[in-house]
Amino acid sequence: MIIDCHGHYTTAPKALRAYRDAQITGLKDPSWRPTKAALAISDDEIRASIEGAQRKLQLERGTDLTIFSPQASGMGHHIGDATASQYWSEICNELIYRVCKLFPKNFVAVCQLPQSPGVDPQNCIPELERCVRQMGFIGLNLNPDPSGGYWKEPPLTDRRWYPLYEKMVELEVPAMIHTSASCNPAVHHTGAHYINGDTTAFMQLITGDLFKDFPTLKFIIPHGGGAVPYHWGRYRGLAQDMKKPLLGDHLLKNVYFDTCVYHQPGIDLLTKVIPADNILFASEIVGAVKGIDPETGFHYDDTKRYIEAAPLSAADRAKIFESNAHKVFPRLKAAMAR
Amino acid sequence: MIIDCHGHYTTAPKALRAYRDAQITGLKDPSWRPTKAALAISDDEIRASIEGAQRKLQLERGTDLTIFSPQASGMGHHIGDATASQYWSEICNELIYRVCKLFPKNFVAVCQLPQSPGVDPQNCIPELERCVRQMGFIGLNLNPDPSGGYWKEPPLTDRRWYPLYEKMVELEVPAMIHTSASCNPAVHHTGAHYINGDTTAFMQLITGDLFKDFPTLKFIIPHGGGAVPYHWGRYRGLAQDMKKPLLGDHLLKNVYFDTCVYHQPGIDLLTKVIPADNILFASEIVGAVKGIDPETGFHYDDTKRYIEAAPLSAADRAKIFESNAHKVFPRLKAAMAR
């Protein structure tokens, strides 16, 4: 079985975008509150939006199950306030729940959180609990920069985040550290902000000692870990200069990288430098890059091909494709059984 | 001959730091103005600061010439105003000039600019002209984020930067795109801000069409291009989705990467993915990572070893070690002859 740990609902019916636009317009009118009744999306519309896209690609490429979350750029935590973010997160998470009910063999749910710039992340706990306990979600996306490209929040090692981590540990759910859209004109969202978010988060974790306080907390750094594996010598050296333990001891019991790296040399480097125990298969479909690579004739984001071609043992390939996902997402097995 | 295109004066005599501290304290007193007479550093002190560090490493590692600029993190464009930045840049550039006069065979000068957040970069032109025309400098470091980690300036493709580019073209000097210190507590300077700056700048260049307007303008993206070569498939795919030309045509006639990547697999990826015509040897000494890699027994930043071990032809290695530097820095030959 091949498990893709990183897929987003980028193909949601247009009514979702219209609802969000109305919500954003309504932010200017303090008396306006969006109601869920204003959003009407049928099961047939959801089925069509998945069958023509994510499910079609699963079948074409030979993957089985996608750990599925709302569109990352759509989270837009920098828009409006915590109440707006709460409404919007509930809507998006409920749509993911419906996708997973309609395609129970092929999609398992991960939620977005109602983060908001400057707001204590404790506000996210009720929505996280609702998603996990009531709707069977197995993980969450955590945005390290709710300001959308200006990095106004304290680092992930700050105690401000601790109540959320305590709840994650209690619920046994990992977080993918994933930025949302950039509202900063200097910072392109899929080409710079996503990758920088990965790099910045990993460096925050090197600098701190978070996993001393949370030895079972688990993070996935997406997009192949940003710049980190390419600069693995730099990060080993910076940790050494800071008198931190070797990265294997300091971070790699808790931190995992996905395989959203869209060419063979990148995957070859990732699988050479990072232990197979710390790599999870992912393609980010339908995601950042949509085209076909003229150098290979295949889609850039058909990452399964690169993993298959990488010089890996069968045992390591099986870890990356399947068993590591179970290790990182303890609730995955039960979710698949339902 | 081996030319290192990226070295900083990180070992300047302590009096420089004391002067800067006094300047920063003085910013609170509007009547205070730092004078150059307040800074007394002798030629002997400069000699000692170089002979025990950068020159010692050149001799030990077998490199010949370093293209040398003020400490990047020390530029601190986010501190004070444009006047403070002007004084500070003059001081730092004059010290580089003195280093290059004292070690004429081993160091050639590149300047920092008196950038300041929100200030039109035209303010940098007089200092750039002074450095190039009066003191024989051959290039400049350009900070894409003078706000120090908050990215408040428009992208490098914005017309606001054009007068500076016009002067660069006229003077035939390339820019290394290099951030300075981060004053953002979420963003570590050498582990995140430097690398993110490289990635962000490259993505800005993909998005725009700068080199249509400046076909002879040249940029070096340091630190091996940030995350770019590792995600080369992503960047090729994003450019393709945006209907831009192939990256070879769109950017690689104007953009170069250095080799400040501190492990063999990273250099192997860089030299596999990026044409040898676009790679310049560099080590960033004395720089971000100071230790010895326990896996190799050599300094992480002894990048010459990685280039020597990479599967390159002799011709490509010669381009990386020497001839590309002459191509990118047209004033290098004359500077060496002086």
Image (tube, coloured by chain):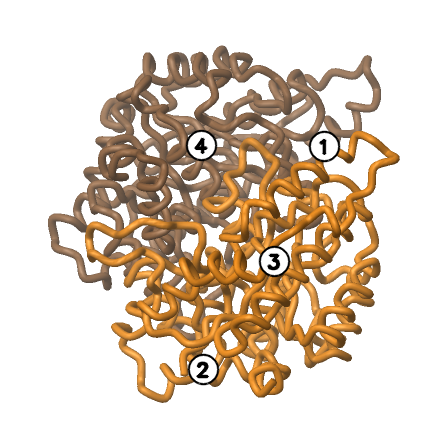
Chain colours: A orange, B brown
Mark 2, mark 1: which one is toward the viewer? Answer: 1
Count residues near mark 1 (Cα–Cα under 10 Å), then give few for <14, some for 14-19, many for 20+.
few
Q: Is residue B291 left or right of residue A139?
A: left
Position of the N terminus of chain B, as image quadrant, is top left
Mark 3, mark 4: which one is toward the viewer? Answer: 3
Give the CA separation, mark 2 to mark 3. 25 Å
Position of the C terminus of chain B, as image quadrant, is top left
Disc 4: which residue: B99
Q: Position of residue A284 (x, y in %)?
A: 46, 60
Count residues near mark 3 (Cα–Cα under 10 Å), then give few for <14, some for 14-19, many for 20+.
many
Numbered disc 3: secondary structure:
helix
Give the CA separation, mark 4 to mark 1. 59 Å
**Quarter-wise, where is residue B201 in the image?**
top left
Numbered disc 1: secondary structure:
helix
Give the CA separation, mark 2 to mark 4. 57 Å
Mark 4, mark 1: which one is toward the viewer? Answer: 1
Give the CA separation, mark 2 to mark 1. 43 Å
Q: Chain of mark 3?
A: A
Q: Residue at 51% across / 34% down in the picture?
A: B70
Q: Are marks 3 and 1 in contact (CB under 8 Å)?
A: no
Disc 3: which residue: A201
Q: Chain of mark 1?
A: A
Q: Chain of mark 2?
A: A
Q: Residue at 84% across / 19% down in the picture?
A: B29
Mark 2, mark 4: which one is toward the viewer? Answer: 2
In the rendered image, the vertical position of residue A241 relative to residue B329, given as above or below? below
Give the CA separation, mark 3 to mark 4. 38 Å
Disc 1: which residue: A25
Q: Any mark on residue A322, and which? A: 2
